[in-house]
Image (cartoon, helix red, strand yellow):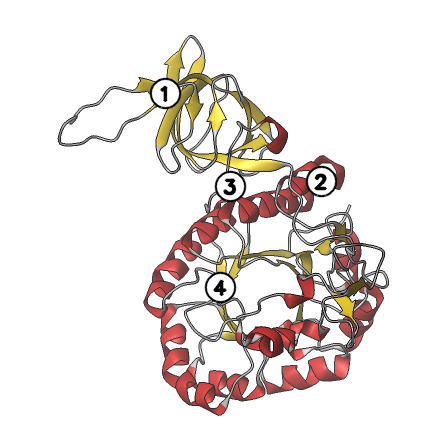
């Protein structure tokens, strides 16, 4: 068994709730963006003024913070960078993730207290490129996703020993080389290289003959079209040993557009394996969250694609987030939780807790905790058969004790009819 005690687990933090989930469930570091120059502009992200509090929160838990400044930079962008970089430098964040050489040069001048990490957007695939970036001042490179495990081992052997190697281990894959794609800009006017990708690679495509308008011919044997660029999601949970032995020092999880439930679940799974659990014990967790079919990307050959349809698979919905727990008498526990998706009296919810195996909490005595109002300043709990008010608080008793921040999930096939996933 590989010792992962010096290997970093790096998690995405697309917003405050995702940051808190990543920290609580075992990330060693998080990467996030302020309101400009990040490759995930559709994420909630953080305002520049919010970055110091985010950094303070993470640092209080011993977690590092890396800020992305990794879009392709126009002259206008470059002109706006100095004060932006100075603000990030003053925030106390640990590193900048940069892809543009001009932005890198400015970061050395205006963010001198921060380490510089070279983004995967820079397509570092060989030791000579890694050495050149190191000579310029980089402390880490995020290697191109197109590299195999063998390629990474060779780069590690020839690159400077103090240059850290970071690689993606989980999440969505891009069909373009290192994510540098023009499809979105050409087809929708939204540049993926500026963080606004519309993911046209996930759309259905078919042939149309010039003289037969309206007659569509699928590229594959599928009447709806084909998804020839629809890459499988990356999952390396069963191959962390190989990556560590190849010299990867930071395992990176993709997903700054994902919700807190996703971040918590994936971090929980990878943390468990890095702490000694068998990958087979957590694979069900990775199937619980929204995902495409899993593959190993380019690490062991050519990546696989999903040609039958777009969309996600998932086995569970995020039912609720625990807000309080205390003794309920007769050996039980009274749990209060914020509702995210419907659950009902008698349901068996699975509880996700940091560094613990999944436990089952059976819902008994479900009641809605009505918010005080002018007409009802001291309302009593109302017994209900179903928790169906999104973001309202409910209480129930269970045989297990939970902690505030624990997540409760319910199988999709057992969720009450009409349950809809909400942002959490």
Mark 1 element type: strand
Disc 3/disc 1 C-alpha distance (Å): 21 Å
Residue 323 on image: x %, y %: 38, 33
Q: Nearer the viewer, residue 313 or 66?
A: 313
Quadrant (top left/top right/bottom left/bottom right) for the C terminus:
top left
Q: Please tell me how crowded label 4 is: few (under 14), some (14-19), or many (20+) other residues with Cα within 10 Å.
A: some
Residue 64 on image: x %, y %: 49, 60
Question: Is residue 120 something that shows in the picture?
Answer: yes
Q: Earlier in the sequence, mark 2 or mark 1?
A: 2
Q: Earlier in the sequence, mark 3 or mark 2?
A: 2
Residue 304 on image: x %, y %: 81, 58
Q: Earlier in the sequence, mark 3 or mark 1?
A: 1
Residue at the farthest top position: 330
Question: Mark 4 sits on what residue?
Answer: 42
Disc assigned to residue 367: 1
Disc assigned to residue 421: 3
Quarter-of-image position of residue 173: bottom right
Disc assigned to residue 283: 2
Q: Residue at x 76, y 79 (%)?
A: 127
Disc 4/disc 3 C-alpha distance (Å): 19 Å
Question: Is residue 357 something that shows in the picture?
Answer: no
Q: Nearer the viewer, residue 305 or 186?
A: 186
Q: Please tell me how crowded label 1 is: few (under 14), some (14-19), or many (20+) other residues with Cα within 10 Å.
A: many
Q: Residue at x 13, y 31 (%)?
A: 374
Disc 4/disc 1 C-alpha distance (Å): 36 Å
């Amino acid at each position: 068994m590989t010792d992962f005690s010096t290997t970093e687990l790096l998690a995405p933090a697309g917003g405050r709730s995702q940051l808190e989930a990543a920290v609580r469930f075992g990330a060693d570091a998080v990467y996030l963006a302020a309101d400009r120059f990040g490759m995930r502009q559709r994420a909630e992200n953080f305002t520049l003024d919010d970055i110091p509090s985010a950094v303070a929160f993470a640092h209080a838990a011993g977690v590092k913070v890396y800020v992305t400044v990794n879009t392709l930079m126009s002259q206008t962008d470059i002109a706006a960078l100095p004060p932006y970089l100075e603000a990030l430098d003053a925030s106390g964040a640990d590193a900048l993730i940069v892809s543009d050489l001009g932005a890198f040069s400015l970061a050395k001048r205006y963010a001198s207290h921060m380490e510089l990490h070279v983004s995967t957007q820079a397509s570092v695939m060989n030791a000579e490129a890694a050495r050149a970036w190191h000579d310029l001042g980089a402390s880490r490179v995020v290697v191109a996703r197109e590299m195999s495990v063998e390629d990474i081992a060779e780069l590690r052997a020839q690159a400077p020993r103090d240059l850290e190697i970071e690689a993606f281990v989980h999440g969505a894959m891009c069909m373009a080389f290192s994510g540098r794609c023009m499809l979105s800009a050409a087809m929708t006017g939204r540049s993926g290289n500026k963080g606004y990708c519309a993911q046209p690679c996930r759309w259905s495509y078919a042939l149309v003959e010039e003289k037969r308008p309206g007659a569509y011919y699928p590229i594959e044997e599928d009447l709806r079209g084909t998804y020839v660029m629809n890459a499988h999601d990356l999952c390396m949970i069963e191959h962390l040993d190989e990556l560590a032995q190849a010299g990867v020092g930071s395992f990176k999880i993709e997903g700054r557009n994902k919700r807190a439930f996703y971040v918590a679940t994936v971090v929980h799974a990878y943390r468990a394996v890095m702490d000694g659990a068998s990958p087979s014990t957590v694979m069900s967790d990775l199937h619980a969250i929204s995902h495409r079919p899993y593959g190993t990307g380019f690490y062991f050959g050519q990546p696989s694609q999903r040609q039958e349809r777009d969309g996600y698979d998932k086995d569970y919905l995020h039912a609720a987030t625990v807000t309080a727990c205390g003794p309920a008498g007769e050996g039980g526990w009274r749990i209060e939780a914020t509702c995210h998706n419907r659950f009902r009296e008698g349901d068996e919810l699975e509880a996700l807790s940091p560094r613990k195996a999944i436990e089952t909490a059976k819902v008994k005595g479900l009641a809605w905790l009505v918010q005080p109002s002018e007409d009802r300043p001291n309302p009593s709990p109302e017994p209900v058969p179903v928790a169906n008010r999104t973001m309202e608080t409910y209480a129930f008793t269970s045989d297990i004790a939970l902690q505030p921040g624990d997540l409760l999930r319910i199988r999709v096939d057992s969720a009450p009819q009409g349950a809809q996933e909400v942002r959490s």
